[in-house]
Image: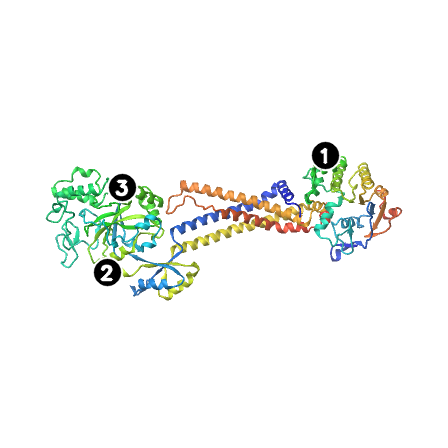
Amino acid sequence: MMPVGKLARMVVANTARSPRHFILSAFGIVIGIGAFVLFLALTQRAGMVIEKVFPLDEVQVVAPRVSVGGAEAEQKVLDDETVKTILGREEVASAVPRMSLAFPAAGRGDFQGTDLKFEVGGFSDGVAGDYVQDDARIRALFRDWDALEDDDNRVECIPPSEDPDEDIIQSPPAPPKEKKVGANDKWRDNGWGLLIPNEAPPPPPKKKEDTSSIFDEDGGPSDAYDSWMGKVIGKAIPRPLPTYDNWFAQYAMKAAARRKGKPPPSKEKKEPSYFNPCPNPDRYYCDEAERRCKHRVPIVLSSTVVELYNNQFSKAHNMQSADTQFVHNLIQQKGLSAMRFSIGLGFTTVAGSTAATNVPPRRVEAVVIGVSKRAMPVGVTFPIDYIKRWNLEFVGEDAASSYSSIIVTLKDRNQLAVFGQWIKDQGLRLEDSLGERFATVIFVIRLLFLIISVAILVIAVINIGHNFFIQVSERRREIGIMRAVGATELDVQLIVLGEAALIGIVGGLLGIALAFGIGTGWNAYSEASVPNFPFKPTSWFEWRTWIWASALTFSTLFCVLGGFLPARRAAKMEPAQALVQN
Amino acid sequence: MTKSYGEGEARSQVLRGVSFDVDPGEFVALVGQSGSGKSTLLNIIGGLDHPDDGEVEVLGVDTIKASDSRKARLRNESIGFVFQAFNLLDHLTCLDNVTIPASFAHGVKNVEQRGKDALARVGLERFGGRYPGELSGGQKQRVAIARALFGAPSLLLCDEPTGNLDSETGKEVIDFFRELNEKDDVTLVIVTHERRVSSIAKRVIAMRDGMLVETSDEALAATGAGPS
């Protein structure tokens, strides 16, 4: 075999000699490789977005909903027993139950200065605290705070009462005012529209303060209320809290105005401040029902919710758009109270909804502690203990013991079929995972794209082969001369293959450049002209080294393949015959 | 050896049992009518073609049994070819044409200098940078001879080297061959129609219909290989 350096020099010289041949041969390769790279980078990005939206390493076990003659037939229940059975399977790595809130609930909160109301009932899920572990803050806060035995912060407090102008519709309708709820009930109306426990009123807070006068005869806040509250705030809150246009503040001022029989003081024009008599006000609030400071209910959101917020709320309300990092930063800068909101358990924002609950509605405060990929895609995710407790309180034993689904992580995804069959045998089923379906669609699209680009490449290869056959027969004499002066068959073959490989390398590089150019152009166009939609990417393409490498390898390999037969023919040519041509 | 081309009806026997020896340093002229098999014989000797049957040994190498690379090395190092059609590569300069055998050899040193020396040998030292298209027929043939001499071969195989040249230029080329044979002791086998060539050859081998006929000067007239 001839020396490699001389071979390379000859190959480059021969290629440079016939640019027309080069362009004709390389054209198809450039297009084919361009398509190949573009499609791979696009589907790679799509796959990554899907993995971000839907965790693909988990499956959900649900109870099938069988409907017989229009009525729901008896349904298989997912309970602790089911979880235990599933955990007993050897292919199962973990099984985490999920429970949905079984009754209506409404959320209301101030998000960057805008009052948002939203339905929570159908969109609330509880999972075990240790299942959601995304970052240090979430690990520390995502737990059942009410289960803490001795929480020093859980001091008694006087809650601000309900705002009569509140436009959240109660469901079921609130009992008429003045009418006492039955003696056996746990709740009574305090005459101010606020339902308080039907037990002895809690002892007045802290002897040091003379707080007896902050209630009037009806149990509503008295004139002394404001001054007392001011003192408490002065003590408990070292800095002015961010303004919070919620019913607490509104009520305090409206109530005071009503008592005095005159319009609300001009003070109201100023931004009302949020009254929070609790220590550690970033995390604790004064609970209306228990009249005690409680930790806010920690919740996590999914990145899908953040995206939906960006594309629905933030646009409609002309608010700043958020991303996962933004939520994180907001919490770090302004504290947790920047992300707090209230949940009216048993309330609904949907008029005419009649779901009955065992107890009258009440409010709790919640706080968004972060964005988690373990959060349910659409809705808010609580530690499951809260959901269990609330379901028990508002609906009953059944609701507090049956899960909506069980999130199962398999040790090996390949065992999914086995596990799926077993689940079927148990009378349960695997939830059709949207992520799985999307992944399949992406896989099919990717396959289709690959077939298209491979088809282009195959045509290009045939074209290259054809061109080389022509070239080889045009260069018969040259090949004959080279054989006469000492070229072996292998040398001749390598020269032709080398030229083909060079076309592959240069064509591949040009194809990659073409794909990158189109990709960059499309990104710029998308940035400027394509309307926003959830998960609209900043780049539509994921440029990976393996894509570059495989493109270059493929293009070289394909070209060498195309040059193979012509090279063989050139090598097998009898030199005497080749020279006779002239 | 025997050699035929084509298949079936179209099959034609080109060599019908040719056998001869050439001693080192000989100057042999192969004469005969067109189609008598001279060129085929020359190509077989040079390993550019192979016989159907028989034995060929060139410079101690059995070119029928030898591998392709062994034969290539033999051509590269020990055999020079000169063709009637010059067979230069038009896209290369004269110097590059002369040095092309070096492309297929390992460890050749001073390639450029040796190429220039070979060109000087044929009186074209100032034509190294020119392209074959710019040269006359005689000059082209001298470049081709320089290429054949580049590897300092011990055997030079020439197929009608003066066929495309006018008689004056042809004479120069023939004189050069004689000089090569006498001074450098290069073995020469020249296929020719020209009596002028065969007259200076030390030995003349005449062919007719693929067979050797006579090796005497008198026989030439009978074969029609007289002065053309």
Looking at the image, which residue is at 43% across and 59% down?
A412
Residue picked out by circle 2: A396
- Left or right of A452? Residue B5 is right
Chain under numbered label 2: A
Residue A329: quadrant of the picture: top left
- Please give the chain letter of the residue carrying mark 3: A
Asked if badges 2 and 1 are on one and the same chain, I answer no
Q: Nearer the viewer, residue A448 or A84?
A: A84
Q: Which residue is tagged 3?
A: A113
Label 2 and label 1: CA atoms lie apart by 107 Å
Q: Is residue B61 left or right of residue A356?
A: right
Horizontal arrangement in the rendering, residue A56 relative to residue A28 (left or right): left
Residue B94, given in percent of the width and then of the height, sits at 71, 37
Front in this rendered view, residue B51 or A238: A238
Amino acid at the residue labelled 3: Gly
A428 w.r.t. A498: above or below: below
Gap in Å between the C-alphas at discs 1 and 3?
A: 89 Å
Compare marks 2 and 3 and give the one earlier in the sequence.
3
Residue type at mark 1?
A: Phe
Three-letter residue code for mark 2:
Gly
